[in-house]
Amino acid sequence: MAKAYKITEEISNEIRMIRKKIKNKSEDIRLHAVELRGLGKKNKEIAEILEVHEKVVSK
């Protein structure tokens, strides 16, 4: 079973601010995945949103 990650609203806002400044697409995707995980999304949902394979999300 996957770990349940909890991300506070403050950290989520901080991630969004960092994502606005990032120019590296892979870093942006990684941070977006972290943000979505914090919102309670499952790997399959995250993969669909980010348009990547589910195995990429589970890394």
Image (tube, grey):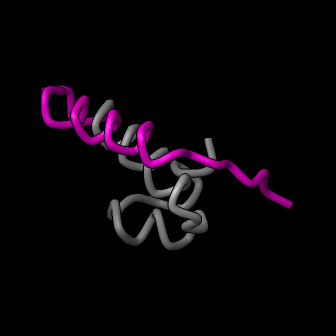
Q: Nearer the viewer, residue 56 or 17?
A: 17
Question: Residue 9: x, y in percent?
Answer: 44, 48
Question: Residue 48: x, y in percent?
Answer: 40, 71
Q: Quadrant of the C terminus?
A: top right
Q: Nearer the viewer, residue 22 or 26?
A: 22
Q: Magenta residues? A: 1-26
Residue 30 lies in what quarter of the image? top left
Q: Residue at x 22, y 34 (%)?
A: 17
Horizontal arrangement in the rendering, residue 40 relative to residue 27 (left or right): right
Horizontal arrangement in the rendering, residue 32 relative to residue 3 (left or right): left
Q: Is residue 37 above or below residue 11?
A: below
Q: Residue at x 54, y 55 (%)?
A: 37
Horizontal arrangement in the rendering, residue 41 relative to residue 51 (left or right): right
Q: Nearer the viewer, residue 13 or 25?
A: 13
Horizontal arrangement in the rendering, residue 56 relative to residue 30 (left or right): right
Q: Is residue 23 above or below residue 43?
A: above
Residue 18 lies in what quarter of the image? top left
Is 2 one of the magenta-colored residues?
A: yes
Q: Residue at x 58, y 65 (%)?
A: 40
Residue extending farthest right: 1
Question: Residue 38: x, y in percent?
Answer: 54, 53
